[in-house]
Amino acid sequence: MRNNLEKELLNKIQPLAALKTMITSWQKEGKKVVFTNGVFDLLHIGHVTYLAKAAELGDKLIIGLNADSSVKRIKGESRPINDQNSRAALLASLFFVDGVVMFDEDTPLNLISYLLPDILVKGADYTVENIVGAKEVIANGGEVKTITFVEGYSSTSIIKKIKEREL
């Protein structure tokens, strides 16, 4: 029985072309596809709350996950703490996540332009004008929304707290 669960979890982690096929099929069925992206290095309650709120905006939630090389360029050589396969598996294990796809670029613009979700979501620290891919989603008839973060939670602050305790 556990093998089926593992297979189901791994089936959520898809290469780009396979995910595009899934999204097209869902959209033909009238389902709203929601997309968000991020590093999700140390999964915490802030991430889970944000992703759950994103999932509530539509029928299917897709996460674009920064690949390890992308994280290093954006966050520095000491990141990520968890490798891309571990981060993808943790995200895929959330019942409200329907797909995870990795991307190696510094921004998800190419990914968003190719997948064209119905709803693009980012944290409320962004304005719609500053959200990568917003123009492309809106031009395709989609929407762009922001979600407020849970205060006091970030992978960076968790890493800092761990380092302080080591001293």
Image (cartoon, rainbow, N blue to C red):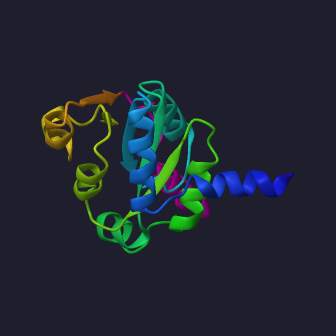
Query: Residue 32: x and y, percent?
Result: 40, 29
Asked if residue 167 shows in the view, the reply is: no
What residue lies at 44% left-to-right and 57% top-to-bottom? Answer: 101
Q: Is residue 106 above or below residue 146?
A: below
| Left or right, 57 with reference to 82 | left
Q: Quadrant of residue 151?
A: top left
Residue at 45% from the left image edge and 37% from the top image edge = 26
Furthest residue in direction right, as rendered? 1
Q: Is residue 18 left or right of residue 126?
A: right
**Residue 57 found in image quarter:** top left
Residue shown at 63%/58% (left/top)? 10
Q: Is residue 90 left or right of residue 156?
A: right
Within the magenta stretch, is there residue 55?
A: no
- Name the residue rendered at 51%, 66% in the picture: 84
Question: Is 17 above or below relative to 69?
Answer: above
Point out residue 87 in the picture as x, y percentages from the top left corner: 55, 58
Residue 111 percent across, percent down from the top left: 29, 55
Kindly report the secondary structure that dominates the magenta region of the rendered protein.
Answer: helix
State the extent of the magenta-drawn residues as a range.
148-167
Left or right of 162? Residue 117 is: left
